[in-house]
Image (cartoon, rainbow, N blue to C red):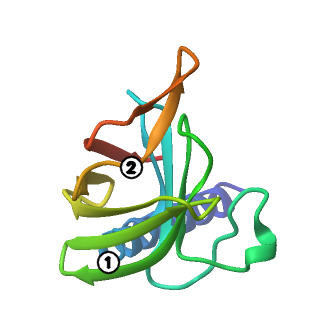
Amino acid sequence: MKNKLLLFFCALMLAGGQLSAQTADRPFKGRFYNEENRIYLTLDLYEATLDAPGLSFLGKMNGFMNGNIYGIWLLTSHKIEGKTATLRFSNDQGSDAQTVRLTAQSDSVLIYKALDGNSIRRVEKRKLVKIPSEMTFRRK
């Protein structure tokens, strides 16, 4: 019985090591969260595997942003250059677009910077206000 438990725990530790190696190789895959602004960023820049909440009829995509923002922002295009990715988002109505630069600070921290102004907004006291143009997202 003790040997079986030992084998089980060894297998768990090996699987955990493989998981952290995968996230280090693919920093732009996972679910990230900015606690200050309560915004989620869900990404898989390597394969189109994600369904946006309530918008699965659009098919699989590479990412979306939701949470404390107005609507859902869908990733329409992206380009990875080393530890930096340039993303183009469009809102779920197709009326606004935003270009964003993400820099992988580590395997679990992404630095978000809006380029060319900021179009993404949230509702605050019954008004639409822009979200910060720079934020830190941590793997959830």
Specify the quadrant of the image occupied by residue 22.
Answer: bottom left
- At a point 38% along the width and 49% down the height, the residue shown is 119
Dot 2 falls on a residue whose secondary structure is loop
**Residue 112 spot, x, y in % from top left:** 27, 52
Q: Earlier in the sequence, mark 1 or mark 2?
A: 1
Q: How many marks?
A: 2
- At a point 30% along the width and 36% down the height, the residue shown is 132
Q: Is residue 131 visible?
A: yes
16, 67: nearer the viewer? 67
**Residue 48 spot, x, y in % from top left:** 58, 83
- At a point 63% along the width and 59% down the height, the residue shown is 92
- The label on residue 130 is none
Using the image, determine if residue 65 lies above or below residue 99. above
**Residue 113 spot, x, y in % from top left:** 23, 53
**Residue 57 spot, x, y in % from top left:** 81, 74
Q: Is residue 7 left or right of residue 51?
A: left
Dot 1 falls on a residue whose secondary structure is helix
104, 122: nearer the viewer? 122
User: Mark 1 packing: few (<14 Cα in 10 Å), some, or many (20+)?
Assistant: few
Q: Nearer the viewer, mark 1 or mark 2?
A: 2
Q: Is residue 63 left or right of residue 110?
A: right
Residue under pointer 2: 119
Q: Label 1 vs label 2: CA separation?
A: 31 Å
Q: Residue furthest front?
A: 95
Q: Amino acid at mark 1?
A: Asp
- The label on residue 25 is 1
Q: Amino acid at mark 2?
A: Ser
